[in-house]
Image: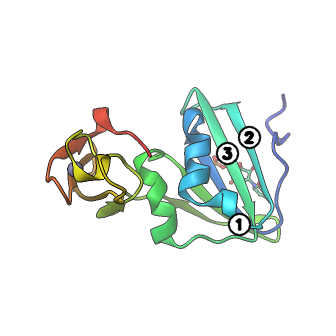
Amino acid sequence: MSKRKLKVSAIKNGTVIDHIPANYLFKVISILGLDKIPNQITFGNNLESHKLIHKAIIKVSDKFFEDKEINKIALIAPAAKLNIIRDYEVVEKKVVNVLEEVIGIVKCFNPMCITNNEQITTKFTVVSKKEIALKCHYCEKITSEEHLTII
Ligand code: CTP
Ligand code: ZN
């Protein structure tokens, strides 16, 4: 297929989130609450990519995310690239950054933790960003990248 041929149609205005690991497409949709907004959304999954073997892409029309909002996906899609589109042109490219605090996205690794036994939203402090390590606000145990489970 020619490089110029888009697999997912171009959008007029909005945000294109590119380079999402394919297996996380629906998690990203859920973390950003894209299933709850009225905007026009198109996406492609399991597309070929050089950087990731398979990637996903999401295009959200007329939506310009705040950094705080979009950075929530950095935990699962650290290589994600944002393209801000205005009048069909890419006017800005952004990368995502891991936040200082993670609320309600990740499960605490400790089975004894109150968040795993009662209806309590998880809350962590990020103690390491390179190899993700999250310290639970409730039980103080560290959930590391290898044990990371997205709720
Ligand atoms: N895009 C879009 N609608 C537009 C313009 C661009 O959906 N009106 C999408 C493209 O399909 C692409 C992304 O936005 O997935 C970035 O566009 P562009 O910078 O033109 O592509 P590349 O040069 O391939 O960018 P990169 O190498 O950063 O992925
Ligand atoms: Zn805990």
Image height of 6 relative to 30, above or below: above
Taking the spot 82% from the left edge, 71% from the top edge, the residue there is 87
- Left/right placement of residue 144 relative to residue 16 reads left
Label 1: which secondary element? loop
Q: Are marks 3 and 2 in contact (CB under 8 Å)?
A: yes
Taking the spot 36% from the left edge, 60% from the top edge, the residue there is 121
- What number is the disc on residue 57? 3
Image coordinates of residue 67 in percent, x first then y, are 48, 70
- Left/right placement of residue 87 relative to residue 110 reads right
Closer to us: 115 or 59: 115
- What number is the disc on residue 44? 2
Q: Mark 1 points at which residue?
A: 37
Closer to us: 145 or 116: 116
User: Which amino acid type is marked by label 3?
Assistant: Ile
Labels 3, 1: front one: 1
Label 2: which secondary element? strand
Q: Are marks 3 and 1 in contact (CB under 8 Å)?
A: no
- Pointer 3 or 2: first along the chain: 2
Disc tally is 3
Residue at the farthest front position: 118
- Pointer 2 or 1: first along the chain: 1
How many neighbours does mark 2 have within 10 angstroms: few (below 14), some (14-19), or many (20 or more)?
A: some
Label 3: which secondary element? strand
Taking the spot 51% from the left edge, 63% from the top edge, the residue there is 70
Taking the spot 70% from the left edge, 32% from the top edge, the residue there is 47
